[in-house]
Amino acid sequence: MRNQHKLILSNDELLNSKLRDELISNLKKEGFLSRKIFFYKKGIKEEINIENQQGSLFSEKEIIDLRLQEKSILKDDLDFFLSLLGDDNSDRIVVISSINKKIKTSAWFKKISKYLEISEIQPVYSNQFKDWIKDEAKNMDLLLSEEGINLIASRNEENLLSAYQELKFLKCLDQKHTDYEFVKDSSEYHVFSLINSCLSNQVSKSLEILEIMKLNKENEPGIIAVIHQQLDRLEQYKKNPNFFLKGVPRDYLSKLKIKAKKISPPQIKSLRKKIADLDKDFKTGKAEFWTELRKIIVNFGYI
């Protein structure tokens, strides 16, 4: 029996990816446990065939996650897609997603659409933005006051991705009940939360916070200075286990002491050099700041 392949259409990348993740999660429950992601480009046919020859593709119940970024596709690729969608392999399902709804008007779309179950996502309009924030917060188990919702809406100016990232950040802080004052001050917690999660070896959480900081275009020299400060404190603890910091949270102090026991002087020296190099290269325009900082955070977090 031929599977009903899927197509997701939306002009918003976040809405597209959220529905795609939900759909793929449901397919995995149906036994489609393997997944291969492809971004459409010239030569996609060869790329998929190479995977097939290696035996990693189509060998079990599998999802082909194909993402279209163009309005048009090449004729040879169209023939390949028709073959892929039209065969009777019940162990394979194709999920196509596009953030360009204009593909519906193309001739090639009409040819493949008969094989597809189409989900078209409606945009979130200006008058729906606050309700969307409220719904997403509820899905994350965050309870926001009307003031908090209004502030997030105002701060993100109808940018769904930015608002979603801010909600994720609040969730990262384990704030199940979030009031207006906390939302108002949340941007000031980013650097501290990044350091706190690094000290706790929570690398994935650190990277989530880092992405939010990047999105918010936070002060790069300030971030470098804070990381330098943590390395200074770790070095002081290595030299003197009785070293004490006044006016800092006990939880942070406890994590700092544990990290100091794990990290070695050569590791501190290596991190110092990487931070110093990043600072120098950033000031001279030679480094992509957030990419290089991500590497340092991963290094720091896994120690």
Image (cartoon, rainbow, N blue to C red):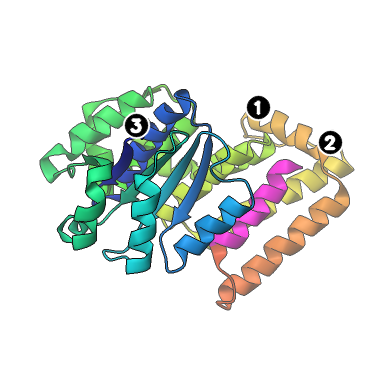
The magenta segment is 290-303
Badge 2: residue crowd in 10 Å (few <14, some 14–19, many ≥20): few
Between disc 2 and disc 3, the foreground one is 2
Disc 1 secondary structure class: helix
State which quadrant residue 276 falls in: bottom right
Q: Please tell me which of labels 2 and 1 falls first in the chain.
A: 1
Between disc 2 and disc 1, the foreground one is 2
Disc 2 secondary structure class: helix
- Between 49 and 191, the one lying in front of the other is 49
Residue type, mark 2 in image: Lys
Q: Quadrant of the N terminus?
A: top left
Along the horizontal axis of the image, is 203 left or right of 22? right
Residue labelled with disc 3? 181
Residue labelled with disc 1? 250
Residue type, mark 1 in image: Arg
In the displayed structure, 37 sits above or below 184; it is below
Q: Is residue 291 in the magenta section?
A: yes
Residue labelled with disc 2? 261
State which quadrant residue 124 falls in: top left
Give residue 205's position: percent from left, percent from top: 56, 38
- Between 45 and 137, the one lying in front of the other is 45
Name the residue rendered at 40%, 39% in the picture. 88
Name the residue rendered at 44%, 38% in the picture. 89
Disc 3 secondary structure class: helix
Residue extending farthest left: 127
Magenta span: predominant SS is helix
Q: Please tell me which of labels 2 and 3 falls first in the chain.
A: 3
Q: Please tell me which of labels 3 and 1 falls first in the chain.
A: 3
